Amino acid sequence: MRLLVRFLGFLFAAGTVVFLVGVAGVAGAIWHFSKDLPDYSQLQDYEPPVMTRVHASDGALLGEYSKERRLYLPIQAVPKLVINAFLAAEDKNFYEHGGIDFTGMARAAVLYAQNFGSNRRPQGASTITQQVAKNFLLTNEVSFTRKIKEALLAMRIERAYSKDRILELYLNEIYLGLGAYGIAAASLVYFDKSVNELTIAEASYLAALPKAPAALHPVRNRDRAVERRNYVVDRLLENGWIKQADADKARKEQLNVTSRGNGAHIFAGEYFAEEVRRDIFERYGEKKLYEGGLSVRATLDPKMQVMARKTMVAGLVRYDEAQGWRGPVSKLDISGDWGVKLADVKSLGDISPWRMAVVLETSDQSARIGFQPGRELGGAVSKQRQTGIITLDGVRWAKAASGPAKGRTPSSVAQVLSPGDVIYADPLFDKEGKPVEGQYRLRQLPEVSGALVAMDPWTGRVLAMVGGFSFDQSQFNRATQAYRQPGSSFKPLVYSAAMDNGYTPSTVVVDAPIEIDQGQGAGVWRPENYSSGKYGGPTTLRNALRQSLNTVTVRLAQDIGMPLIGEYARRFGVYDELPNYLSYALGAGETTVMRMVTAYSMFANGGRRVKPTLIDRIQDRYGHTIFKHDSRECRGCDASGGWKNQAEPQLVDRREQVLDPMTAYQITSMMEYVVQAGTATVVKEVGKPIAGKTGTTNDEKDAWFIGFSPDLVVGIYVGFDKPRNLGRGMTGGHLAAPIAKDFLKLALADKPAIPFKVPAGIKLVRVDAKSGMRAGPGEGGRTILEAFKPGTAPPDNYSVIGVADMDGRAPQGYSQGYQPDAGNIMRPGTGGLY
């Protein structure tokens, strides 16, 4: 008995020692692994990388920018269905355990022992808390060391944070495939829905993804994805979170995924979106752009953008097709499955309704074509094959651009197309504008390009912008990056300098040949009007601008001086520094469409400085406004407690007055005359008050039109990226102005015909439209109302600027009151101040 007691005592002592050693060992292990654990307190202030989203002025999504596509969603905004789906799939006891699921760990240990030596990846037993610890603070290393650290961190996290906070971090951090991080982004990427719109089947599929997003791809591994989704549905039913009928319906639901692209989400908004991206990058840097979760409200008007895109493309195509058919995009061997071969040919995805096609067979009257098939989410070529017919009407424009048949209208389709030709086609429309079923029109990508900018002249907000024919074809934005000569569209700035310095629209300048000695061996410059050899003699400034007379502009620039014109060009933002050469008065310098539209906005708004912007407001991830374009002070806008008979809020505009409002109106009135009776008469078809100016450069390389109504400015440039001649007669009035007409007819269709506002102080006096002199009683016909500033009046006799080179002789028909001065200009006679 004594021996038994001693033996039991020995066992107890040994057990105690073993227990103490074990406890000490565990404590030592905990101390060992705990001493270099990451600081979990950083989770409190954790800011995950969140995508920046850009919205148009109407709230429509324009673009998203991110390295990790993530939208942070507070746990309070996550639907119960979505939470239950993830708990069912990952950790059904999440709200009960303290960070570690010991039952799951035991199960994983048994499986590990069974699979030992099989090279299979060990099955994890991680709770959601452990996954948070791993994803945020540890690596993906597969080892017992990492698992121990993960468990220790999980317990600490559970003591420091609430269950809801832990779940919120998890649901926003996890990677769910297709570049989507977090449930909000995944819901948009897979189903183009918000999380509140997800069905049971859709929520279950997203909940199935954390284990293996690539292995559960909805197209490549559809069967496995559906199986795993249904497993989650079964767990929801088993836990009592959904009803039997709902589970049965969810299992039968097809796994239909709507792929959401990374590009611009508004049709034709690619150039605009990219310009906004550049702006944000320059303001805040790469990290803020791609990870800062900024909310950007852009100035884009989606409806106006579509109008701009439609009219600009139509204008470029109209010119290009007039030059003739240059041939197919490429050739294909159409034997076998032509769809797979055609799918591999790179096509432009932003020129809808144009589609790439291959010619399958031809005859005199038609050609059968097969359209490029699309690709499924997994990259496989769609098995659907769509075909159509191009009739003779669809190729009549396709005259040969070169060779013996150059310029000849085709008499058969086979003269233009042959089997294997890869082309573009779009629906053929009848005379009533309705698409003809199954029939298409041949198209070709234009070589010419250009740009269009539409702006609110009062705020500088860019409402629409087209940077070229296709963003997929070229990301070079010709509206902001292409520096080209504006030609005569620069002349209104020269005339503004003159009007601010004593001239009037009725000032007479001689239109006659002129020679300029450029000095320093540069030779003699002889500027000519576009209609070379035709000169009109003494001409009012109004008529000179209407006819875009170069010799008058040069004489005017000589008189007021190029340094003054350079100052106006800088003030209007057209040029940063203008050389003091007279040729620059004719628009020989290089600038952009955006700069020209901004300058014309200052004519339209009465001379106030305008700063162009594509962004109205930027907010950070917490909703705090960090940028606002409108800098005007609003006095009385912060009134609280409702209206108490206080005065209306007042907007205080402290923007610089860069031009006298009366001068701005005079120039506007003169440019309105350009539209009514000058080089831009095609724009009259708009049927609303429009002012504007055309521009054409030497050798007709660039064609411009900048015009405006009281509330909208539009600028258009047309030209080749590598400048070359557009063709004889291809002027701003012939190429750019018709595009502006088409755009303004659409943009102003629902707007009333508001006349330009006459500023206080301006006197409207009836004058002779040709001579600029005051009209006598009873005179009609060619009289107009001219705008004069206080202290000026229409002349009673002629004083002609620029006749010293005519040996003091009065121009024919202008002898009465003609008073030659001793200098190079003729000063005003009595009755006319300038």
Image (cartoon, rainbow, N blue to C red):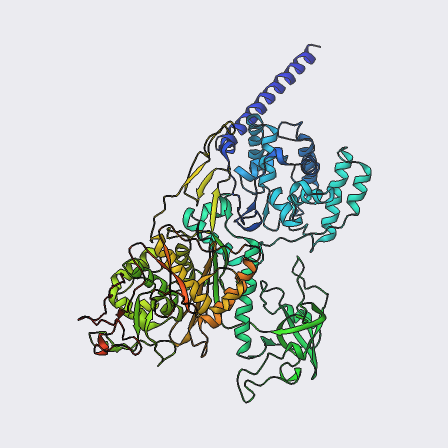
In the figure, is residue 593 to the left or right of 273? left
Residue farthest along the top direction in this orientation: 2
Total labels: the figure holds 0
Image spot of residue 772 (x, y percent): 34, 67
Image spot of residue 540 (x, y percent): 34, 68
At 54% from the left edge and 58% from the top edge, which residue is drawn? 747
The quadrant holding residue 721 is bottom left
Front in this rendered view, residue 390 or 657 = 657
Residue farthest along the left direction in this orientation: 822
At 45% from the left edge and 46% from the top edge, which residue is drawn? 287
Front in this rendered view, residue 713 or 327 = 713
**Residue 572 seen by the camera:** yes
At 50% from the left edge and 49% from the top edge, which residue is drawn? 298
Front in this rendered view, residue 311 or 814 = 814
- Reply above or below: 42 against 808: above
- Reply above or below: 378 against 782: above
- Reply above or below: 266 against 106: below
In the figure, is residue 754 to the left or right of 440? left
Image quarter in which the C terminus is found: bottom left
Image spot of residue 248 (x, y percent): 81, 42
Image quarter in which the N terminus is found: top right
Residue farthest along the bottom direction in this orientation: 404
Front in this rendered view, residue 279 or 227 = 279
**Residue 472 seen by the camera:** no
Image spot of residue 622 (x, y percent): 51, 37
